[in-house]
């Protein structure tokens, strides 16, 4: 931005270079000025110029306005410009110091060129989104869906915002929980110029973890001693011990009966033998007649 002091110094240097001629009238000075208005380098018609808040004219179709500034020598003239709708007014136009300027031969120099930039109030941009080949992903602009990626995983979003404004672009991946990273986003800032923004996001598919099912083991039973298989008669209970290892009552009774019968048999056989033995002893001991 050119300040007042810079402008005054530039005009003083110009006057020294070309020399100072005689003033046009007592205490008067005139300066030929050529205003060139443009928007990003393109001529801009319809720009109104003001000198000390007084309108002096409007630029033509080529964005040019030629004007002769006049006043008392030594005065400063403030310049302002009003740009058409959709453009921002420049705030860095210089202040001119009125001095008679001529060349060494006393001839008036050519008109002073004043640049009048009228920058657009909004800037256009395009966001190129690359989703690593994944198709059908929603593209959100500040939380609002504006596009979806095509078969190649690419989407284009047009933006139109004021300079220095920020916006956020996001890929919605909540419906694909195996993609990493989830819900990636990036924030961009609009410069004071038309711009192309690139959102290049790498995505990876995470394999779902395999759930290992544990085999259910059957409950462990108390071990029981194995016994040889026995042939049993129908409708007869087994005489083997039960699961607690205790003999059954029936088996005990049978054992007692067998013991009693054995004792009776032994007694029955023993009585005749004892009587026979006694008779032999009697015959031996008795005297012979």
Image (cartoon, rainbow, N blue to C red):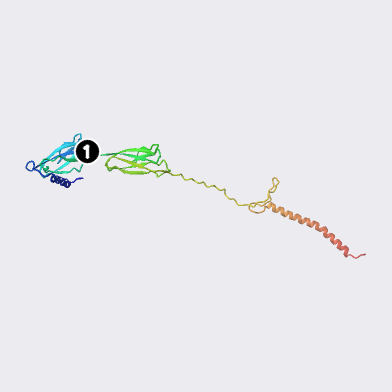
Q: Residue at left 18%, top 39%?
A: 35
Q: Quadrant of residue 126?
A: top left
Q: Residue at left 20%, top 38%?
A: 37
Nearer to us in this view, 26 or 259: 26
**In the image, 128: left or right of 61?**
right
Q: Residue at left 22%, top 38%?
A: 38
In the image, residue 96 lies at what x, y percent?
Answer: 15, 43
Nearer to us in this view, 191 or 239: 191
In the image, residue 223 lies at what x, y percent?
Answer: 61, 52
Q: Residue at left 33%, top 44%?
A: 187
Q: Is residue 182 above or below residue 61?
A: below
Question: In the current view of this chain or complex, which residue is farthest to the front?
Answer: 105
Nearer to us in this view, 210 or 90: 90
In the image, residue 181 lies at what x, y percent?
Answer: 40, 45
Crowdedness near tag 1: few (<14), some (14–19) or many (≥20) residues, C-alpha within 10 Å: many
Question: In the current view of this chain or complex, which residue is farthest to the top?
Answer: 61
Q: Quadrant of residue 127?
A: top left
The C terminus sits in image quarter: bottom right
The N terminus sits in image quarter: top left
Nearer to us in this view, 46 or 253: 46
How many marks the image carries: the answer is: 1
**Which residue in the protein does label 1 denote?**
38
Q: Is residue 67 above or below residue 257?
A: above
In the image, residue 81 lies at what x, y percent?
Answer: 18, 39
**In the image, 42: left or right of 242?**
left
Q: Secondary structure at mark 1?
A: strand
């Amino acid at each position: 931005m050119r300040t007042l002091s810079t402008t005054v110094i530039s005009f003083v240097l110009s006057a020294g270079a070309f020399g100072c001629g005689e003033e046009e009238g007592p205490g008067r000075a005139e300066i030929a000025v050529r205003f060139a208005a443009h928007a990003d380098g393109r001529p801009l018609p319809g720009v109104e110029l003001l000198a000390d808040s007084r309108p002096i004219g409007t630029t033509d179709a080529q964005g040019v306005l030629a004007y002769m500034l006049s006043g008392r020598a030594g005065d400063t003239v403030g310049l302002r410009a009003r740009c058409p709708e959709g453009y921002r007014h420049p705030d860095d136009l210089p202040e001119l110091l009125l001095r008679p300027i001529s060349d060494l031969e006393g001839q008036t120099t050519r008109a002073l060129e004043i640049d009048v930039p009228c920058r657009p109030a909004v800037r256009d941009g395009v966001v190129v989104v690359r989703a690593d080949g994944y198709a059908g992903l929603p593209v959100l602009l500040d939380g609002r869906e504006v596009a979806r990626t095509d078969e190649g995983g690419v989407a284009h979003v047009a933006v139109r915002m004021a300079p220095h404004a920020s916006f956020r672009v996001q890929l919605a991946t909540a419906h694909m929980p195996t993609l990493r990273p989830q819900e990636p986003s990036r924030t961009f800032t609009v410069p004071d110029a038309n711009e192309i923004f690139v959102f290049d996001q790498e995505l990876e598919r995470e394999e779902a973890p395999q759930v290992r099912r544990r085999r259910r083991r059957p409950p462990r039973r108390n071990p029981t001693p194995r016994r040889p298989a026995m042939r049993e008669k129908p409708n007869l209970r087994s005489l083997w011990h039960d699961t607690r290892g205790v003999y059954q009552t029936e088996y005990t009774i049978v054992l007692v009966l067998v013991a009693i019968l054995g004792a009776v048999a032994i007694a029955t056989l023993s009585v005749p033998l004892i009587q026979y033995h006694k008779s032999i002893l009697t015959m031996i001991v008795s005297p012979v007649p």
